[in-house]
Image: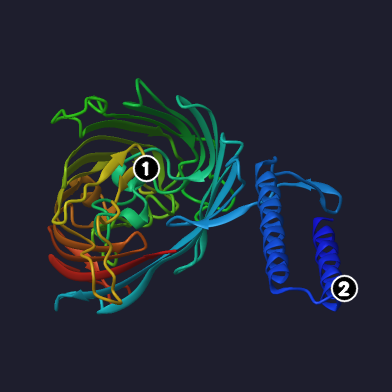
Amino acid sequence: MKNGIFAFIVIALLTFQGVSSAGDITQDRLRALEDRIQALEKELQQVKNEAQQAKVEVQPVVKDTFQGKKVTPVYAFWKNDFYLSTPDENFWMKIRGNLHVDYKFYGGNSGNPTEFDVRRARFDFQGMWYKCIYFRVQEEMADSPYLRNAWVDYKYRDWLHLRAGQMKPPFSTSWWTTDNNVNFLERGANTPLYPYFDRGAWLWGETFGKTLTWNIGAFTGTGPEKDEQRGDIDDHKDYFARLFYTPFKNQEGSVLQGLHLCLEGVIGKQSVPTKRFEKKGFGAAVRDDKYWTWQVGDDAEIGSRNRWGVELHYIGGPFSLSTEYLVTKWNDIDLPNGVSEDGKVSSWSTWVSYFLTGEHKRVGNFGWKTPTPRTNFDFVHLKGTGAWEVLARYTYTGTDDSLFDSGILLGASDVNEYTLGLCWTWNPMVRWQMNYVHLHGNRDGIRTGDKDKIWVSNEDMLGLRMIFKF
């Protein structure tokens, strides 16, 4: 309507100009006419701006725009992840993924070949509804594709959440650290010390000024759907309890502000060895190796498998220290030949880290977080430093000799692991890791190689990884 009025005024003025020109219009009157047109144009632009401002301030609900239904517009933006969000942020979703590419060199006595491997290739969808319902669905595409995370978290209060689905049970900060934030190429321990992904439900929350996070849960005890598609193998469940405590979190300036303590435990009964936690064997630090393998099959029966652990973590500026002591104990492993045995495997893993460029890590109930570089590295123009981090780790893994003497396990009952690491984070999306790992095992040694299985007392590996997050 306003555009029509403006056109009418212009036409009227031009008509007036034509009539006046017949009467010998002067140059001054032409200039006055041009000034009037410019003033009208400015007035029209101001009206348009005011209309646009009024449009922004109205509620973002547009009627009858999609099959006669009310719809809410969604904004797409990038903030180290690709987001879709409503203007009021009551609904949002992150569409993300990662790619980890490894190149590994082994010592001459190893049965593992020098290899190039796509360690991880994942798609990940995370979101929130009504600011109280969170969800995550994550699919692994490398090796044998399978569903990893598939859960919903209902937030009733900060101190009370209910999470259900398939996920990591609440046990071990190292295990809970997401793969994009891992401090070394591989973690210091593995299943059965870690509970891996499992199906179940748990309650958790933050209390006492968010210094204490508590967790209580119940899970199948068999692993993810990939391992047991039926959902479970018996009526028994694993019951988890975990406390993650940061006593001096709110004391600004205290040298103990970065101290974190954790106590955790799992009790569970089971009927037979599971694919994930027993028959898979045990390997850590070097993914292609097995410290020991399980020698008995489905004919064996197990009374119970319990876990417990204690942790201490400390962050002081660019320096970090972490130590975990984890134990898994089996009771009443009954073999077909009438032998019944108890036994346990334990792991004590300690590592230190220091950022040469001044960044510092974060840690909490859900694992370690790698910081964003203070200055990103521009690999096109070779500007900026990125974040440089040096690390070292020692892990001792001990398994009861009785499990080897009875023929249940084959391999090394004691393994010492030494790892030196260097990490270079270019930006929030790209990170490089380099590790040198040395393993030393006793008894039958450490199994290397898949086709030609070789048992060695020492294993050395140099690994390089590129982590690309998208």
Q: Which residue is mark 2?
A: 19
Q: What residue does disc 1 label?
A: 334
- Label 1 sits on a secondary structure element that is strand
Residue at horizontal 32 percent and vertical 78 percent from the top = 116
Which corner quadrant of the image does residue 249 belong to? top left
Relative image position of residue 403 (x, y in whole percent): 25, 47
Q: Quadrant of the C terminus?
A: bottom left
Q: Determine the residue positioned at 50% across, 35% down.
A: 236
Q: Which mark is residue 234?
A: none
* Amino acid at dot 1: Asp
Q: Quadrant of the N terminus?
A: bottom right
Q: Nearer the viewer, residue 22 or 262?
A: 22
Q: Residue 193: tell me if it is visible.
A: no
Q: Residue 384 lies in what quarter of the image?
A: bottom left
- Classify 10 Å Cα crowding around label 2: few (below 14), some (14-19), many (20 and above): few
Circle 1 crowding by C-alpha within 10 Å: few under 14, some 14–19, many from 20: some
Q: Earlier in the sequence, mark 2 or mark 1?
A: 2
Q: Nearer the viewer, mark 2 or mark 1?
A: 2
In the rendered image, the residue lying farthest to the top is: 208
Amino acid type of disc 2? Answer: Val
In the rendered view, would you say 125 is above or below 256?
below
SS at mark 2 in the image? helix
Task: In the rendered view, tell whether residue 223 sits above or below residue 327.
Answer: below
Q: What residue appears at the point 37 percent right and 42 percent down from the top-left corner?
A: 334
Q: Residue 167's spot in the image, x, y percent?
A: 48, 45
Labels 2 & 1 near each other (Cβ < 8 A):
no
Q: Is residue 240 left or right of 165 when viewed as pictured?
A: left
Residue 81 position (above or below residue 313): below
Q: Name the residue at 55% across, 47% down.
A: 127
Q: Does any portion of residue 325 appear in the rendered image? A: yes
Label 2 vs label 1: CA separation? 113 Å
